[in-house]
Structures are given as C-alpha cells and as structure tokens.
Image: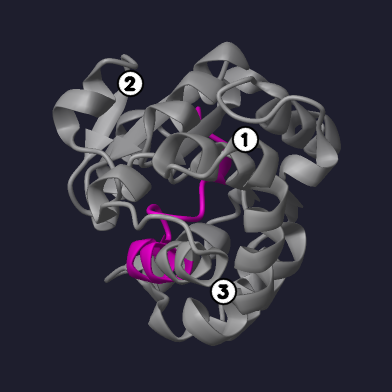
Amino acid sequence: MIRNIFFDFDGTLADTSEGIVRCTQATLQEMGLPASTPQRIKATIGLPLGQCFARGTDTPPERVDEACATYRRIFGDIAIPCITLYPGVKEVLAQLHASGLLLAICTSRSRASLETLIRMLEIEPYFCALTNNEDVSHPKPAPDLALLLLERLGARAEESLVVGDTIFDLQMGRAAGCRTCGVTWGNQDRPTLQTASPDWILDDIRDLFVYLRTHQSL
C-alpha cells in the first residue's frame, strides 16, 4: 500500500525547461561564454546547478561557481515568468491530499526558489515536507533526499512512491528502497526512463490514480 508520494519538481510538477534554458543562455551570454544547445541543457535538468553548467555547457571548471551565482541572480527576472504547472497537476495534488496521502517534494532546486515557486503556483498547502540539496551531503541520484524524507515523515520505504521525470529521480528512489514512477512529459523520454527500471511510467499525471488503485492506496 502506498501512503506517501515524493515528487520531483522540475519536469514533474512544473514545466520549467524553457525558463531554465533561457536563464542558462543568459548567464553564458553575460559571462562571455559560448551558448549551449537547449537539448544539452535540458539533459542535465534534475542535477545540482553546478553539474548542469559543468555538463550542459562549456563553462570552464574554474568559472562554474560564478555561473551558478549569476544564474541565481537573474533567475527571478528571466526564468520565473516562463514557469507553469503541467495540465492536471493541481487537481491531482488536491485529490491526493484530500485522500490522506502524505505528499512531499525532493528536488535539486534551491529551497528559496522552490518555496517561491510553489507559493506562486498555489500548490504549497498540499505538501507536508520539502527537501533539497541544501539538506544533504549527496544529491540525486544518491538516495539521501528520499531517505531524509522517510526519516522526517516516519515513513516506510516500501509504502512510499518516488515520482520523477529523470533517471536521477528513479535511481534515487530505488536506492532508498522506495517504489518508483517515471513521467514522460518532462525532460527525459520513455526509453531513457526505462533504463532505470521504474515500477511504472505515466504519460499523464491523472493516470497516477490507476497506479495507486492497483496498489490499494486509494
């Protein structure tokens, strides 16, 4: 039985890819660095910001910290106006919350920006816990974020489901002993998600209820 659902944020609940790409490109331009392709940038979404610049752009290693600081400084003006919830997300969260399930977010996004976004998108009341990379020593795909949520909620891994749009989310959840569910509307496609052997893959967030009924949680 599933009693707890741990959601990734970027690419799972909210469509942030356009904002992230724009903000990354603006950062590179301000720093006088070569532009990167949207595909290369999107492939790193879900990783810590420093790794996104190291792997998704040609930022020199010695300038990654500068890139992160620049990105965070301009994020509010450039990225936030582009960010929206995916269709059906708010309604599904409301129903899950009303059913008594405990909902939480585990993300690589900074706590400040996450809190700003969930308030702006009017989904903050549905979540009882938030974790991000500031809370742990090892980011996704390490299990630390999910393990911390289990500890904070006094929850059992076998009764918890991690939902995310990248293999980093699924690998984190599996390593923590949780069930895992990939979603195809975010930053990685079904074949890529299948490489992480999730228990379920969804093409529409409303199909989450089918999975939950199968596991007798609703």
Image quadrant in which the C terminus is located: top left
Question: Which sits earlier in the primary sequence, circle 2 or circle 3?
Answer: 3
Do the residues under discs 1 and 3 have CB atoms within 8 angstroms? no
Residue 48 vs residue 38, the one in the foreground: 38
Residue at image point 24% right, 48% down: 39
Task: Name the amino acid type tagged 2.
Answer: Asp
Tag shown at residue 199: 2
What is the tally of numbered marks visible in this picture? 3
Q: Quadrant of residue 193?
A: top left
Q: Which residue is mark 1?
A: 61
Residue at image point 60% right, 47% down: 49
Mark 2, secondary structure of its residue: loop
- Compared across the picture, whether 165 is left or right of 79 comes to left
Residue 35 vs residue 191, the one in the foreground: 35
Q: Which residue is mark 3?
A: 123
Task: Name the amino acid type tagged 1.
Answer: Pro
Q: For the residues marked 1 and 3, what is the alpha-carbon distance in whole angstroms?
A: 37 Å
Residue 43 vs residue 125, the one in the foreground: 43
Residue at image point 69% right, 74% down: 73
Q: Quadrant of residue 100?
A: bottom right
Say whether residue 107 is visible: no
